[in-house]
Amino acid sequence: MEILYFAWVRERIGLPRERVETSAATVAELVAELSAREERYAAAFADLSALRVALDQELSDFDAPLEGVREVAFFPPMTGG
């Protein structure tokens, strides 16, 4: 599965993207797996209310299933202007 990081999420983790093998069934489980890896991931995912997630380029929720998903993107909320 391809994981993409944008804006400050990318800055905290230090990568724009990575490919991971996961047994996570939901986005929340994936976040838990990533957070357990290293402190930089834990810092990036410390406040999920400050994050949005897209699955295969469609905005989704953290309780969404990952079955069949090829791409997960994490990013801060977007503001208009």
Image (spheres, rainbow, N blue to C red):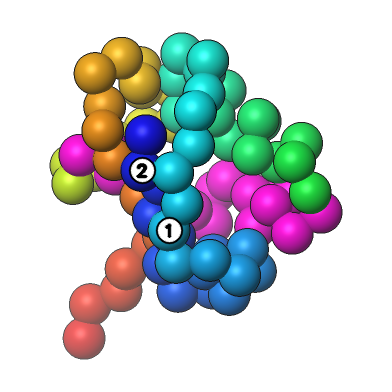
- Label 2: few (<14), some (14–19) or many (≥20) C-alpha neighbours in 10 Å: some
Query: Where 29 sits versus 25, above or below?
Result: below
The disc label shown at residue 17, or none: 1
- Is residue 1 highlighted in magenta? no
Q: Earlier in the sequence, mark 2 or mark 1?
A: 2
- Is residue 53 highlighted in magenta? yes
Can residue 24 be seen?
A: yes
Label 1 secondary element: strand
Q: Nearer the viewer, residue 15 or 52?
A: 15
Report the side of 72 relative to 32 (left or right).
left
The disc label shown at residue 8, or none: none
Question: Which residue has dot 2 on it?
Answer: 2
Instruction: Locate residue 30, reporting x and y percent.
Output: 54, 29
Residue drawn where x is 35% and y is 21% of the image: 66
Instruction: Locate residue 24, reporting x and y percent.
Output: 52, 18
Report the side of 65 relative to 15 (left or right).
left
Q: State the image quarter where residue 80 is shown.
A: bottom left
Label 2 secondary element: strand
Q: Residue furthest right?
A: 39
- Label 1: few (<14), some (14–19) or many (≥20) C-alpha neighbours in 10 Å: some
Distance of label 2 from label 1 (alpha carbons)? 7 Å
Looking at the rendered structure, the kind of residue marked 2 is Glu
Image quarter hosting the C terminus = bottom left
Looking at the rendered structure, the kind of residue marked 1 is Arg
Q: Which residues are magenta?
A: 39-56
Q: State the image quarter where residue 61 is shown.
A: top left
Residue drawn where x is 31% and y is 14% of the image: 67
Q: Do tag 2 and tag 1 residues touch (Cβ < 8 Å)?
A: yes
Q: Nearer the viewer, residue 73 or 3?
A: 3
Can residue 53 be seen?
A: no
Report the side of 59 relative to 38 (left or right).
left
